[in-house]
Amino acid sequence: MASQARAAGDEPAEFGKTLRQARERAGLSLQELARRTSVRSDYLRALEETDPRGLPERILARGYLGAAAKELGIDPEPLLTQYDACFPAAHAVPRPARADPEVLFRIVTISLSALIIAALIGWWIYAALQNRPVRTARQASAAAPAAPPSRTVLLSVNSVPSGAAVYLDNSYLGKTPVSDFPIIARSKAVLKFVRSGDEVLQETATLDSNTSLTADLVKLPKTPSAAVKTAPVRSRAEATTAASAATQSAAPPAGTEVSFDFTGSSWIRIRSGQKVLYEGIPAVGTVLRFPGPLHARIGSAGNVRVRVGSGKAKTLGGVGSVVSANFP
């Protein structure tokens, strides 16, 4: 988990605000971004809110932040720098208090006495060991070496074709290409590549230094044509009529009608009071109709034309702008 906890009531740090604003400009919900990056939506929410209590260990949290930034088309380096500033990994070591001269003299005296006693004990042990048989070179080499201290190396992974989810010892790293991901050095690691339509590839690798790997994926065999079921193709008018009928059947009949015509891709959430009537990204060409009064939050206002009653349809902002409005 992150090394510090954000105090209750604090505003999210700059990297969390930037991540949330980029997602809303892209017209994506947390669930859609989670599906695209293979990062759990609760981790994405914790990153946006800069809440370390909802994040995994530091190395994975940084990797998820970088993966989300790349998916949203923003440079991950400034966000990672802001993350490190918000949740630093190292802690300052307090300076020891100055020792009193008299206390220091006693410590030196006791230390010298301890050294003399240790020397006598060491001589006694040395003399006792002279009577024991000496180990051969083979026996000495069989002794287990001391474990080396942990250190961090950089791992870069790609796949052909790219876009495969990469797992290192069952920990998710992101989608290929993954560049300079910091990991703990290890003599044996299991890398797994998962991509829709391809066979799952699992390989064992030695990662005791900076490493760059590329995996060649193999497509799954095609299923027989007789087993393939094709969904019926609907025209824009049919899709609009079906969406409108489903909406009208679920909405109350009273109130001035408000319609939303999706001329491009945009995320939208529509509420009547505290009840959410719709949330998601409809297909381009869909027209949603609801009786007012209601509240709408639109992720890319330039891609949605809004009409209230028999009034003129109009957009409430530009493409990529996030707009909230009450109707009528």
Image (spheres, rainbow, N blue to C red):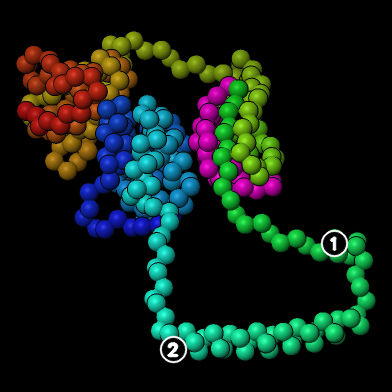
Q: Is residue 13 above or below residue 112?
A: above
Front-lying residue, 158 or 134: 134
Q: Quadrant of the N terminus?
A: bottom left
What residue appears at the point 42 percent right and 65 percent down from the top-left corner? 93
Residue lying at 30% horizontally and 42% vertically, measured from the top left:
16
User: In terms of secondary structure, what is the magenta stretch mainly?
Assistant: strand
Q: Nearer the viewer, residue 202 or 248?
A: 202
Q: Is there CB contact under 8 Å for labels 1 and 2?
A: no
- Identify the mark at residue 102; answer none if there is no mark: 2
Local SS, label 1: loop
Q: Is residue 324 above or below residue 141?
A: above
* Placement of 274 over or under 118, stated as above or below: above
For the residues labelled 1 and 2, the Cα–Cα distance comes to 50 Å
Say if the magenta span includes residue 162. Answer: yes
Q: Position of residue 66 (x, y in %)?
A: 42, 36
Q: Give the residue at mark 1.
A: 142
Name the spot of residue 288 as percent of width and height, x first. 22, 23
Seen at 32% across and 36% down, the residue is 19
Q: Nearer the viewer, residue 57 or 202?
A: 57
Q: Which residues are magenta?
A: 161-190
Residue at image position (85%, 62%) is: 142
Circle nearer the N terminus (1, 2): 2
Whether the magenta-drawn stretch holds residue 313 is answered as no
Viewer-proximal residue, 271 or 94?
94
Under circle 2, the secondary element is: helix
